[in-house]
Amino acid sequence: MNALRSKKALFVAAAAIIAIPSAALAGDGHQDNTWAAKQAIKGGQARNVILLIGDGMGDSEITIARNYQVGANGRLSMDKLPLTGAYTTYAVQKADPSKPDYVTDSAASGSGWATGHKTYNGAISVLPNEKPVPTILELAKKAGYKTGDVTTAELQDATPAVLGSHVINRDCKGPDAMATCAVNDKVNGGAGSIAEQLVQTKPDLLLGGGKQYFDQTVKAGQYKGLTVAQQAQANGYQVVTDAAGLTAASANKPILGAFAKNNMDLEWVGPKPTRTGTEPAKCAVNTARTASQPHLVDMADKALTVLDKQTRNSRKGFFLQIEGASIDKQDHAANPCGQIGETVAFDAAIKRVLQYQKQNPDTLVVVTADHGHTSQIVEDVTLGYTATLITADDANMTISYATADIAGSQQHTGTEVRIAAGGPQAANVLGVTNQTDLFFTMKRALGLK
Ligand SMILES: [Zn+2]
């Protein structure tokens, strides 16, 4: 009965989508989609750009989440973007930037789309020579756009950090963590840690985890002796730490939301993979999740509401990045249900963004990842660790993690990843591009110099 009901719900959802020409392409294999494809290709400028990053969300991670949540023939919200391509994610070697580093981390890959430059693993929007380069968020802000940076990780983690800070090592998250970034340290006349630089760049919204770094004390300069959060307040930020605070926050002042000491809590839990596999099982909601933390979709919703309100009467809209961060982190941890729960939560945020785009078609929406990851759908137990889940198809899906010991950290992979888009300039994701090309696509969409 449940299956019937959900099938019916899917059918209704699919019927509703056909009304939007730009989304009619997805999954409609029996129809000639030539007209819909032509309709989806729009040049010109966008009022808003919304970039959604599934960290570590390669094709394998998308397929795993789709199979589990909506079945093999179902479609996630992220599958409904009209124009899809692939992009290469490689970094470059610091010692010889003419050579690729085939497996990127989130810092180098994020710096790629944030600045248009390839760099080395660990770099936060600096070149291989360690010099800072402007980011898409900084350029958008300078040009009069409102800006937002939203994640389920620490806000100082690589993907949110690359938009509004420049340090030579991604670990330099707070004033107490500058050991590997002497040149960036405020004490040495630098711009400070990632936390300090983020609030100095001053996006209109900073929403995520990483409260511990905002609670560290600034060591030099104008704000010496204050915590980074107090520095933010001195510069006009409202600082909120839970979902109720976020709901109550005014749209008239910038919002710093730090909802967890580190990364935000996971949505789902489930079986741990073993060398000999597991009994087929379903994932469960993580009852240990802190109830006062907003979900990613709540943060996305607040960001859209605030940025929309702030730009209603202005010619220019906003740039917003939203990251589903713990897809990557739970892939590292070989935790299939953790990984899927985060992908599904990310997809809910995408759904909300696509609703916004439907009301505001002058919005470029891009959904992509920064790199591939370990998890694979396999036939049977592997040389690595496997767990078997019962999917929405009521079928068994075995997932393997085979790039590290279970106690270690599973590895990123060097594969190309999906990039999907809709709205003005979306055609620039077609074919095989590079993550650095995304910078130029977004820059062109916003008409930035
Ligand atoms: Zn990772």
Image (cartoon, rainbow, N blue to C red):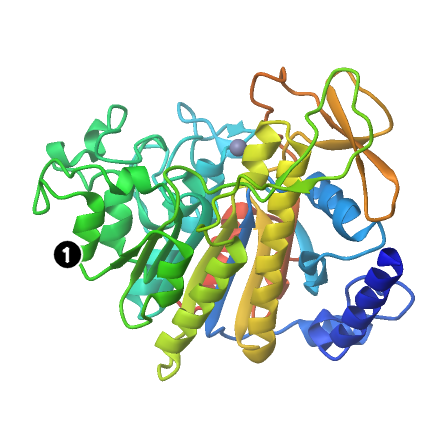
Q: Position of residue 173 (x, y in %)?
A: 31, 35
Left or right: 373 as drawn, with respect to 73: left
Up-down relation of residue 311 to residue 63 (above or below): below
Residue type at mark 1 is Ala
Q: Quadrant of the C terminus?
A: bottom left
Q: Position of residue 61 (x, y in %)?
A: 69, 40
Q: Quadrant of the N terminus?
A: bottom right
Q: Which residue is mark 1?
A: 234
Which residue corresponds to the image point at 70% horizontal and 29% vertical from the top-left? 271
Relative depth, front residue between 345 and 106? 345
Q: Residue furthest right?
A: 30
Which residue corresponds to the image point at 75% horizontal and 15% vertical from the top-left? 275
Q: Position of residue 59 (x, y in %)?
A: 71, 43
Up-down relation of residue 359 to residue 206 (above or below): below
Relative depth, front residue between 113 and 98? 113
Give the crowd class for mark 1: few <14, some 14-19, many >=20 residues within 10 Å.
Answer: few
The quadrant holding residue 303 is bottom left
Left or right: 239 as drawn, with respect to 346: left
The quadrant holding residue 103 is top right
Q: Position of residue 50 (x, y in %)?
A: 50, 63
Which residue corresponds to the image point at 15% horizontal and 56% vertical from the top-left? 234
